[in-house]
Image (cartoon, rainbow, N blue to C red):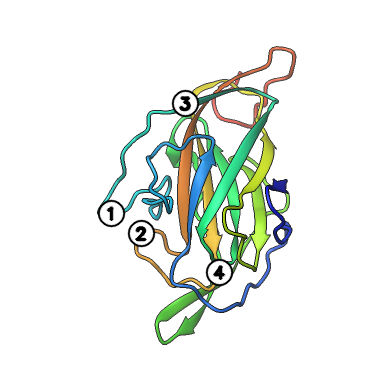
Protein backbone atom coordinates (compact mmCIF):
# COMPACT_ATOMS: atom_id res chain seq x y z
CA UNK A 1 0.00 0.00 0.00
CA UNK A 2 1.13 3.58 -0.43
CA UNK A 3 0.18 7.14 0.41
CA UNK A 4 0.40 10.16 -1.84
CA UNK A 5 1.88 12.10 1.08
CA UNK A 6 3.73 10.75 4.13
CA UNK A 7 1.37 9.36 6.74
CA UNK A 8 1.60 6.93 9.62
CA UNK A 9 2.07 3.48 8.11
CA UNK A 10 -0.85 1.12 8.56
CA UNK A 11 -0.55 -2.35 10.04
CA UNK A 12 -2.57 -5.55 10.22
CA UNK A 13 -2.89 -5.92 13.98
CA UNK A 14 -5.92 -4.85 15.94
CA UNK A 15 -4.74 -1.97 18.10
CA UNK A 16 -6.52 -0.34 20.99
CA UNK A 17 -6.64 3.20 19.72
CA UNK A 18 -7.14 5.65 22.54
CA UNK A 19 -6.74 9.27 21.52
CA UNK A 20 -8.73 12.46 22.02
CA UNK A 21 -12.13 12.10 20.42
CA UNK A 22 -13.34 14.06 17.42
CA UNK A 23 -16.99 14.67 16.70
CA UNK A 24 -17.27 12.75 13.42
CA UNK A 25 -15.22 10.97 10.80
CA UNK A 26 -15.85 10.89 7.08
CA UNK A 27 -14.15 9.56 3.96
CA UNK A 28 -14.52 9.82 0.21
CA UNK A 29 -14.13 6.73 -1.96
CA UNK A 30 -12.21 8.18 -4.90
CA UNK A 31 -11.49 4.89 -6.71
CA UNK A 32 -13.23 2.79 -7.79
CA UNK A 33 -16.11 5.12 -8.55
CA UNK A 34 -18.74 4.63 -5.82
CA UNK A 35 -22.34 3.56 -6.27
CA UNK A 36 -23.66 6.75 -4.60
CA UNK A 37 -22.91 10.38 -5.30
CA UNK A 38 -20.77 11.94 -2.54
CA UNK A 39 -20.52 15.48 -1.24
CA UNK A 40 -17.21 17.08 -0.28
CA UNK A 41 -17.13 15.04 2.95
CA UNK A 42 -18.20 11.76 1.35
CA UNK A 43 -21.76 11.82 2.67
CA UNK A 44 -24.14 10.03 2.80
CA UNK A 45 -22.08 7.12 4.17
CA UNK A 46 -23.31 5.89 7.57
CA UNK A 47 -25.73 3.09 6.78
CA UNK A 48 -24.71 -0.56 6.36
CA UNK A 49 -23.80 -1.96 3.92
CA UNK A 50 -23.20 0.68 1.22
CA UNK A 51 -23.84 4.11 2.69
CA UNK A 52 -26.71 6.49 2.69
CA UNK A 53 -28.61 7.24 5.86
CA UNK A 54 -32.12 6.56 7.09
CA UNK A 55 -33.08 10.10 6.09
CA UNK A 56 -31.07 10.15 2.84
CA UNK A 57 -30.58 6.89 0.91
CA UNK A 58 -28.34 8.68 -1.59
CA UNK A 59 -28.41 9.18 -5.36
CA UNK A 60 -26.99 6.36 -7.53
CA UNK A 61 -24.09 7.09 -9.88
CA UNK A 62 -24.78 3.97 -12.01
CA UNK A 63 -21.01 3.68 -12.43
CA UNK A 64 -19.46 0.29 -13.22
CA UNK A 65 -15.75 -0.47 -12.97
CA UNK A 66 -14.55 -3.26 -15.29
CA UNK A 67 -11.57 -5.39 -14.34
CA UNK A 68 -10.03 -8.75 -15.27
CA UNK A 69 -9.73 -11.49 -12.68
CA UNK A 70 -6.27 -11.83 -11.17
CA UNK A 71 -5.39 -8.21 -11.88
CA UNK A 72 -4.89 -5.37 -9.40
CA UNK A 73 -7.68 -2.97 -8.53
CA UNK A 74 -6.62 0.44 -7.24
CA UNK A 75 -8.28 1.63 -4.04
CA UNK A 76 -8.01 5.36 -3.32
CA UNK A 77 -9.53 7.00 -0.25
CA UNK A 78 -9.49 10.50 1.17
CA UNK A 79 -10.30 10.91 4.85
CA UNK A 80 -12.11 14.23 4.98
CA UNK A 81 -12.68 14.38 8.75
CA UNK A 82 -10.09 12.60 10.89
CA UNK A 83 -10.70 9.74 13.26
CA UNK A 84 -8.22 7.05 14.32
CA UNK A 85 -9.06 3.67 12.89
CA UNK A 86 -8.64 1.45 9.84
CA UNK A 87 -10.32 0.30 6.62
CA UNK A 88 -11.58 -3.02 5.21
CA UNK A 89 -12.46 -4.15 1.67
CA UNK A 90 -14.98 -6.90 0.90
CA UNK A 91 -16.73 -8.27 -2.18
CA UNK A 92 -20.26 -9.59 -2.76
CA UNK A 93 -20.68 -11.57 -5.97
CA UNK A 94 -24.43 -12.15 -6.22
CA UNK A 95 -26.10 -9.95 -3.63
CA UNK A 96 -25.10 -7.38 -1.00
CA UNK A 97 -26.38 -9.78 1.66
CA UNK A 98 -23.08 -11.64 1.14
CA UNK A 99 -21.13 -8.72 2.61
CA UNK A 100 -19.77 -9.33 6.11
CA UNK A 101 -21.07 -7.61 9.21
CA UNK A 102 -19.29 -4.50 10.44
CA UNK A 103 -16.23 -5.23 12.61
CA UNK A 104 -16.80 -6.54 16.11
CA UNK A 105 -16.10 -3.59 18.41
CA UNK A 106 -14.91 -3.28 21.99
CA UNK A 107 -16.38 -0.18 23.66
CA UNK A 108 -16.00 1.82 26.85
CA UNK A 109 -18.73 3.70 28.66
CA UNK A 110 -18.63 7.50 28.78
CA UNK A 111 -21.08 10.15 30.01
CA UNK A 112 -22.17 10.43 26.36
CA UNK A 113 -22.72 6.68 25.97
CA UNK A 114 -20.49 3.94 24.51
CA UNK A 115 -17.31 4.93 22.69
CA UNK A 116 -15.34 2.55 20.46
CA UNK A 117 -11.93 1.38 21.67
CA UNK A 118 -10.75 -1.38 19.33
CA UNK A 119 -12.03 -3.72 16.64
CA UNK A 120 -11.20 -7.20 15.44
CA UNK A 121 -8.93 -7.33 12.37
CA UNK A 122 -8.35 -10.57 10.48
CA UNK A 123 -4.69 -10.77 9.32
CA UNK A 124 -5.58 -13.64 6.94
CA UNK A 125 -8.98 -12.69 5.53
CA UNK A 126 -11.07 -15.11 3.51
CA UNK A 127 -13.97 -14.44 1.12
CA UNK A 128 -15.96 -12.25 1.17
CA UNK A 129 -13.21 -10.06 2.73
CA UNK A 130 -10.38 -9.08 0.36
CA UNK A 131 -8.28 -6.97 2.73
CA UNK A 132 -8.55 -6.06 6.40
CA UNK A 133 -6.66 -3.66 8.63
CA UNK A 134 -5.78 -1.24 5.84
CA UNK A 135 -4.36 2.20 6.64
CA UNK A 136 -4.33 1.83 10.44
CA UNK A 137 -3.62 5.31 11.77
CA UNK A 138 -3.69 7.24 15.02
CA UNK A 139 -2.66 10.64 13.70
CA UNK A 140 -4.39 13.15 11.46
CA UNK A 141 -3.62 12.77 7.72
CA UNK A 142 -2.08 15.76 5.99
CA UNK A 143 -4.65 17.98 4.27
CA UNK A 144 -5.25 16.86 0.71
CA UNK A 145 -3.54 13.50 1.18
CA UNK A 146 -4.90 10.09 0.19
CA UNK A 147 -4.73 6.51 1.36
CA UNK A 148 -3.97 4.24 -1.61
CA UNK A 149 -3.33 0.55 -2.24
CA UNK A 150 -3.82 -2.16 -4.87
CA UNK A 151 -5.75 -5.33 -4.14
CA UNK A 152 -5.80 -8.50 -6.21
CA UNK A 153 -9.16 -9.21 -7.81
CA UNK A 154 -10.26 -12.86 -7.52
CA UNK A 155 -10.36 -14.74 -10.82
CA UNK A 156 -14.13 -15.01 -11.12
CA UNK A 157 -16.95 -13.93 -13.39
CA UNK A 158 -19.58 -11.49 -12.23
CA UNK A 159 -21.48 -8.81 -14.08
CA UNK A 160 -22.26 -6.66 -11.07
CA UNK A 161 -20.22 -7.48 -7.99
CA UNK A 162 -20.46 -5.09 -5.05
CA UNK A 163 -17.10 -3.96 -3.69
CA UNK A 164 -17.50 -2.56 -0.19
CA UNK A 165 -14.99 -0.24 1.50
CA UNK A 166 -15.61 0.56 5.16
CA UNK A 167 -13.95 2.82 7.70
CA UNK A 168 -13.95 1.61 11.29
CA UNK A 169 -13.37 4.39 13.84
CA UNK A 170 -11.92 4.37 17.34
CA UNK A 171 -13.00 6.87 20.01
CA UNK A 172 -16.27 7.38 18.19
CA UNK A 173 -19.73 7.60 19.71
CA UNK A 174 -22.50 5.26 18.69
CA UNK A 175 -24.57 6.45 15.73
CA UNK A 176 -27.92 4.94 14.88
CA UNK A 177 -27.25 4.22 11.21
CA UNK A 178 -23.71 2.85 11.33
CA UNK A 179 -22.62 2.36 14.93
CA UNK A 180 -18.81 2.85 14.62
CA UNK A 181 -18.41 2.26 10.87
CA UNK A 182 -18.92 4.28 7.68
CA UNK A 183 -19.53 2.64 4.32
CA UNK A 184 -19.06 3.10 0.58
CA UNK A 185 -19.55 0.61 -2.25
CA UNK A 186 -18.67 0.35 -5.93
CA UNK A 187 -20.17 -1.83 -8.65
CA UNK A 188 -17.51 -3.96 -10.32
CA UNK A 189 -17.74 -6.18 -13.40
CA UNK A 190 -15.14 -8.94 -13.24
CA UNK A 191 -14.23 -11.07 -16.24
CA UNK A 192 -12.17 -14.14 -15.40
CA UNK A 193 -8.77 -14.52 -17.03
CA UNK A 194 -9.05 -17.79 -19.03
CA UNK A 195 -5.35 -18.48 -18.45
CA UNK A 196 -5.89 -18.65 -14.67
CA UNK A 197 -7.90 -21.13 -12.59
CA UNK A 198 -11.32 -19.97 -11.42
CA UNK A 199 -11.39 -19.12 -7.71
CA UNK A 200 -14.15 -21.47 -6.55
CA UNK A 201 -14.23 -20.03 -3.04
CA UNK A 202 -16.59 -17.39 -4.37
CA UNK A 203 -20.32 -18.10 -4.93
CA UNK A 204 -21.56 -19.37 -8.29
CA UNK A 205 -18.16 -20.02 -9.88
CA UNK A 206 -17.77 -23.09 -12.10
Task: Tell me if residue 34 comes above or below residue 143 in the rendering.
Answer: above
Question: Badges 2 and 1: C-beta atoms under 8 Å apart?
Answer: yes
What residue would you read off at disc 4?
170
Q: Mark 4 packing: few (<14 Cα in 10 Å), some, or many (20+)? A: many
Report the residue that reaches farthest toward the top: 194
Residue 41 location (% of width, % of height): 43, 54
Q: Residue at x 61, y 61 (%)?
A: 141
Q: Tell me which label, 2 or 3, sits earlier in the chain.
A: 3
What residue would you read off at disc 3?
64
Decide if residue 43 is on the left or right side of residue 186.
left
Q: Secondary structure at mark 4?
A: loop
Q: Mark 1 packing: few (<14 Cα in 10 Å), some, or many (20+)? A: few
Q: Mark 2 packing: few (<14 Cα in 10 Å), some, or many (20+)? A: some
The label nearer to you, 2 versus 3, is 3
**CA distance for labels 2 and 3:** 26 Å
Report the residue that reaches farthest toward the left: 55
Quadrant location, the C terminus: top right
Task: Tell me if residue 122 comes above or below residue 33 in the rendering.
Answer: below
Q: Secondary structure at mark 1?
A: loop
Decide if residue 90 is on the left or right side of residue 95.
right
Task: Tell me if residue 128 comes above or below residue 192 in the rendering.
Answer: below
What residue would you read off at disc 2?
177
Q: Residue at x 41, y 50 (%)?
A: 40
Amino acid sequence: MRFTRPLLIGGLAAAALVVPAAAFAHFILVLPVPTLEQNRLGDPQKKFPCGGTTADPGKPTNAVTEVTGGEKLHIKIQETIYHPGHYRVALAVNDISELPKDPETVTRETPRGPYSVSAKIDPNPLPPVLADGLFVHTSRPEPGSFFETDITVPNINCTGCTLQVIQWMAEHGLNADGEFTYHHCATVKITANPRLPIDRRWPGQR
